[in-house]
Amino acid sequence: LAISGHDHMYERQAPMTADGLPDPRGVRPFIVGTGGAHLYRTGGAPRGFTEAKVLEWGVLKLTLSASSYRWEFVTPTGVRDSGTEGCR
């Protein structure tokens, strides 16, 4: 699980290797730059490993356990993305 906030939006990506190649056994990246600054879309078409993208202010809620984690991207209008995944 990797969390960054370098872009001002929310994006969940498919698990990938350290080289940025899709890999079901890799690390799942989240971009969560939605804390109140000006939001913006990134340029170009969505990348092939983007699974969800939201241009709305919100927070990423994580529920961690010994063998899995759950995520919810919560905005003022409700939960916009959610899921559960096992730890590797």
Image: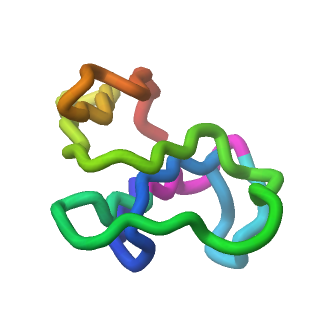
The answer to whether residue 43 is magenta is no
Q: Residue 38 or 73: which is nearer the viewer?
A: 38
Counting from the top left corner in percent of width and height, residue 84 is at 41, 22
Name the image quarter holding residue 65: top left
Name the image quarter holding residue 77: top left
Residue in view at x 37 percent, y 65 percent: 39
Residue in view at x 34 percent, y 58 percent: 32
Left-right relation of 44 to 59: right
The structure's colour scheme is rainbow
Left-right relation of 86 to 25: left
Counting from the top left corner in percent of width and height, residue 76 is at 18, 31
Residue in view at x 31 percent, y 26 percent: 70
The secondary structure that most of the magenta stretch takes on is loop
Left-right relation of 35 to 87: left
Give the total of numbered labels: 0
Q: Which residues are magenta?
A: 24-30
Counting from the top left corner in percent of width and height, residue 54 is at 47, 43
Counting from the top left corner in percent of width and height, residue 50 is at 68, 49
Residue in view at x 40 percent, y 24 percent: 82
**Above or below 63: residue 84:** above
Q: Residue 86 or 12: which is nearer the viewer?
A: 12
**Above or below 11: residue 86:** above
Name the image quarter holding residue 30: bottom left
Q: Residue 16 or 33: which is nearer the viewer?
A: 33
Q: Residue 45 or 30: which is nearer the viewer?
A: 45
